[in-house]
Image (cartoon, grey):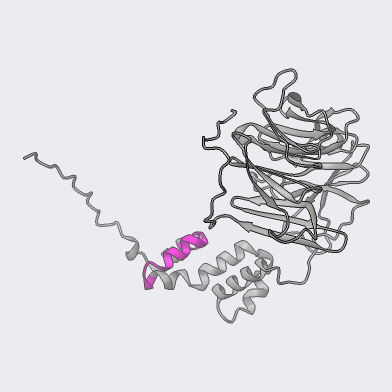
Amino acid sequence: MEQQHLIPLPKRSASSKSVFELETDALTHCVRYLSLSDLSNFARTCKHFKSIAYSDYVWRHLFRKQWPQLESSIISGASGGMRAAYLDRHLAVQKFAFQEDVLGKQWHNGPVTAISDKLLGESSSSSGNLIASGEHDGTVCLWSLSSNIKQGQRALRTMFHGHERAIESLSVSGYNTSLLVSLSKDCKIKVWDTAASSSACSSRCVGKLSFGKSLPLGIKCFESLCYVAAGTSITAIDLRTMRKVFCANARESLHSYEVLPAKSLVGTGGYGKAMLWDVRRSGAKPEPVIEMEEHSGPVSSLHMDSYKIVTGSVKDSYCNVWDTNSGKLVNSLRAGIPHVPDILFGCSAMAVSGSRIVTTTCNDERGLVYLRDFNNATCPKPSKEDNQCTSKF
């Protein structure tokens, strides 16, 4: 019989202590640096740890860290203890249960036409509280969302000038969240370095590009690429070099577009059909890899994920679901309530998340929002083909 060798446990020195042997003050000082989830787990360990985790000393530290400007006023009226004061404040904040409080109360000089899709500098704790807005006169504004701004202080941090027409779209770069990309009505692209220390706002423009007289639709940034939809085409720009790396011409006006970076796919919605483009096939004149023709009007709503493509039109009563890999039609969903006569017409808007889809339809007098969740569905849609769909990629 093979002899087993047991590894002896290391001997504890006489001066070392376990966590249960630590003095209460020392343990309490360490516990206050735990996150809320870790603190909750710590409190479940035993009664001694629970008494420490629920102590006012720990929750006063958490309150001071989250709301330093309110510490003195809350502590003086915290009759139920600091833990109760923290939890009450947390619930009230999440429910918006306060009088409306506008940071800075700074008015724009004109109509606001765009707002950035993400916060600027989210990877940096120092500048992760900035949001950008675009005005009708072409001005780009940076606003602070910091909770440390006191009533009456200016939330406006800086303004960028350089566009001659109204701002159509704003997007934050994926590879550097301090870079802001702006698209104006005259189809000009500008890239702004919002973290630059220069006092001259014009010098913060680190890149620019023009798309002629095309009608702009929007921009979306993923990693180092910026996808620009304008006129009849969608173009991918490398923000590091400001060079065009892909351009797909649909040869008709675009009504919607979507990007699926995980599969290097771009979708465009035209009149009566949607098209799918493979960014990796960047020839001189790339052709769509899939054309989805089941609509009688402009494809104004388009969703893409790794499993499906959903298209909708304001002129159709149905939203169509397609297989992302093969382009085969999987299902057609009524924009309104199934089995009810068409008193409303067309898909005016659509939102898709996982197994859920929300569609809206309306006429001149009334509207309808309809939610479907296929997570617990039990009746499969019969397939028109016996063989499995073949991927086109």
Q: Is residue 185 visible?
A: yes
Location of residue 362 in the rendering, given as x and y in whole percent from the top left corner: 81, 58
> Would you say 309 lies left or right of 23 here?
right
Q: Identify the residue shown where x is 87% and y is 63%.
A: 365
Location of residue 110 in the rendering, given as x and y in whole percent from the top left corner: 93, 51
Q: Main secondary structure of the magenta part?
A: helix
The residue closer to the viewer here, 18 or 156, is 156
Q: Residue furthest left?
A: 1
Count of numbered badges drawn on the protein: 0
Residue 367 to residue 216: above or below: below
The residue closer to the viewer here, 60 or 262, is 262
The magenta region covers: 31-48
Q: Indicate yes or no whether the magenta region holds residue 7.
A: no
> Would you say 271 lies left or right of 70 here?
right
The residue closer to the viewer here, 384 or 284, is 384
Residue 98 to residue 364: above or below: below
Q: Identify the residue shown where x is 66% and y is 71%.
A: 92
The image quarter in which residue 73 lies: bottom right
Q: Residue furthest top?
A: 284
Q: Indicate yes or no whether the magenta region holds residue 45.
A: yes
Which quadrant would the N terminus be assigned to in this image? Answer: top left
Location of residue 83 in the rendering, given as x and y in whole percent from the top left corner: 54, 73
Location of residue 125 in the rendering, given as x and y in whole percent from the top left corner: 65, 48
The image quarter in which residue 231 lies: top right
